[in-house]
Image (cartoon, rainbow, N blue to C red):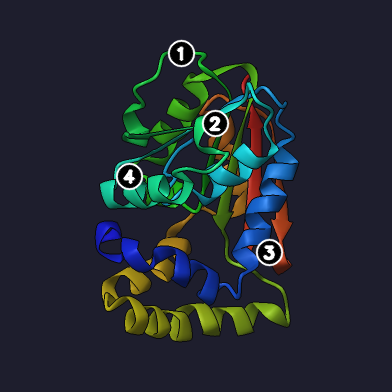
Amino acid sequence: MFARIAPRYDFLNHLLSLNVDRYWRRKSVTLAAAQPDAQILDVCCGTGDLAIEFAHRLGPNGRVTGTDFVAPMLELFRAKVAGTALEHKLNISQADTLALPFADESFNLTSVAFGIRNVADLERGLREMRRVLYPGGKAVILEFNDTHHPVFGPLFKLYFSKILPRLGALISRDSRAYTYLPDSVGKFPPRPAFLKLMEQSGFSNCHVHSMTFGVVSCFIGTKP
């Protein structure tokens, strides 16, 4: 499914979010507060927008490794950065978040934007993100949540469940993908439950920052 929608993925992300997705990623990178020489792993990286945002903030010795198991997404990521000043700061490879091909304690920070809900086993994915972190390293997870804002909440749910799937299907020519999006968000754990799952997966100091009336959350946890 993700391979089919890859050619229009970025366009639809920006269009359907009214470009607010750019702000969500920038804010998450700011909250991450990575050091200039950090070694960062961005899993389920898709076409690389979060990894690129991190790379912009790093110094000459910092590196971001982006992994995803959808090859067409990674091809678009490579095309985005080819020949740019960021190219040497980015490593791009195909990998499954449930079985990351990296040694223990390889990264200062792990991240994922709008991808953790697609992982078949949430706790196993979180444990892999923790495993590859140095002690004291952080996981930064950006994801959609149900919003209960009294005014914005009902309007957003109408848009997200009725309008967005139709627009996405029309433009991407894949009706399944943009029906899957609200369905997968609806099945994602509420904020308190996901924070508890992070703790069960070995993270400490877990906390969450809500954005845009609670539509999106940035979860942060530390490896003890």
Residue highlighted by disc 3: 214
Residue highlighted by disc 1: 104
First in sequence, mark 4 or 3: give its number.
4
Q: Nearer the viewer, mark 1 or mark 4?
A: 1
First in sequence, mark 1 or 4: give its number.
1
Residue highlighted by disc 4: 120
Mark 1–mark 3 Cα distance, whole angstroms, equals 34 Å
First in sequence, mark 2 or 4: give its number.
2
Callout 4: SS: loop
The foreground one among 191 and 5 is 5
In which image quadrant can residue 4 be found? bottom left
Q: Are marks 1 and 3 in contact (CB under 8 Å)?
A: no
**218, above or below 110, in the image:** below
First in sequence, mark 1 or 3: give its number.
1
Residue located 40% across and 64% down the image: 9
Mark 2–mark 1 Cα distance, whole angstroms, equals 21 Å
Q: Which mark is residue 89?
A: 2
Mark 3–mark 2 Cα distance, whole angstroms, equals 32 Å
**217, above or below 86, in the image:** below
Q: Nearer the viewer, mark 1 or mark 3?
A: 1
Residue located 47% across and 56% down the image: 188
